[in-house]
Amino acid sequence: MNATAITLRFARRSEAPALALMSRDLVEAGLGWHYRAERIRQLIDDVNSVALAACDGQRVAGFAIMSFGDEHAHLVLLAVRATHQRRGIARRMTEWLLESAAIAGIASIKVELRTDNAAAYALYRGLGFVEMLRAPGYYRGREAAIFMMRMLRPAGLKPQSWRPPTLDPR
Ligand SMILES: CC(C)(COP(=O)(O)OP(=O)(O)OC[C@H]1O[C@@H](n2cnc3c(N)ncnc32)[C@H](O)[C@@H]1OP(=O)(O)O)[C@@H](O)C(=O)NCCC(=O)NCCS
């Protein structure tokens, strides 16, 4: 199995419990469990968020959730099952989200991760994210976080207004 055998699609509400368990075990391990099924369901329902599932047949092998503001987006969760890691699945999901954000006119995307998460750090660096800040005790007062950002365009630029073409009076 390689990443091309994986299908990307929007996550379904019925998958919220499975995604929540992946968050508990892969993302939030040792920090308590914030992203339970109800919270994931809210994010799937939220019109300002995109929840992507990477599927190996019927099974969800990984997922990613991004929330969109007017100018900035936040990569809220990203996880790939241990059985499917290192096959390009996280890169594919993140690239999909970066492309969607760029098309939506988003200026920048932020993400935070634990300082000891070398895999995620390498993934994000490879996708053009830069480290902005380290925040000691960010996670439950216990663990430090790294904040990273991916610029897509300069912030604050007004989109050009559209005008109908002038008609030639001839
Ligand atoms: C981080 C995580 C999402 C990566 O998923 P993945 O599908 O295995 O990643 P990919 O195969 O797309 O890897 C893309 C790149 O990321 C980096 N990378 C991924 N896993 C790595 C590892 N274990 N060690 C070092 N670099 C790693 C590499 O640069 C890799 O490119 P390469 O394989 O060409 O060298 C996965 O390890 C995971 O779910 N971890 C637990 C949850 C988590 O940390 N989520 C992100 C923080 S919120």
Image (cartoon, grey):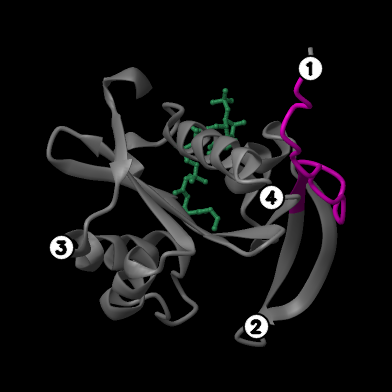
x, y percentage for residue 165? Answer: 75, 27
- The answer, for residue 43, to whether it is visible in the render is yes
Q: Which numbered disc, 1 or 3, marks the residue that appears first in the sequence? A: 3
Which mark is in front, 4 or 1? 1
The answer to whether 155 is drawn above or below residue 102 in the figure is below
> Which residue appears at 70% of the width and 59% of the height?
72
Q: Amino acid at mark 2?
A: Arg
x, y percentage for residue 112? Answer: 66, 62
Q: Are marks 2 and 4 in contact (CB under 8 Å)?
A: no
SS for dot 3: helix
Which mark is in front, 2 or 4? 4
Q: Which numbered disc, 2 or 4, marks the residue that appears first in the sequence? A: 4
Q: Quadrant of the N terminus?
A: top left
- The answer, for residue 2, to whether it is visible in the render is no
Front position in the image: 129 or 84 = 129
The residue where tag 2 is placed is 142
Spatial distance from mark 4 to mark 3, Cα to Cα? 29 Å
Q: Are marks 4 and 1 in contact (CB under 8 Å)?
A: no
SS for dot 4: loop
Which mark is in front, 1 or 3? 1
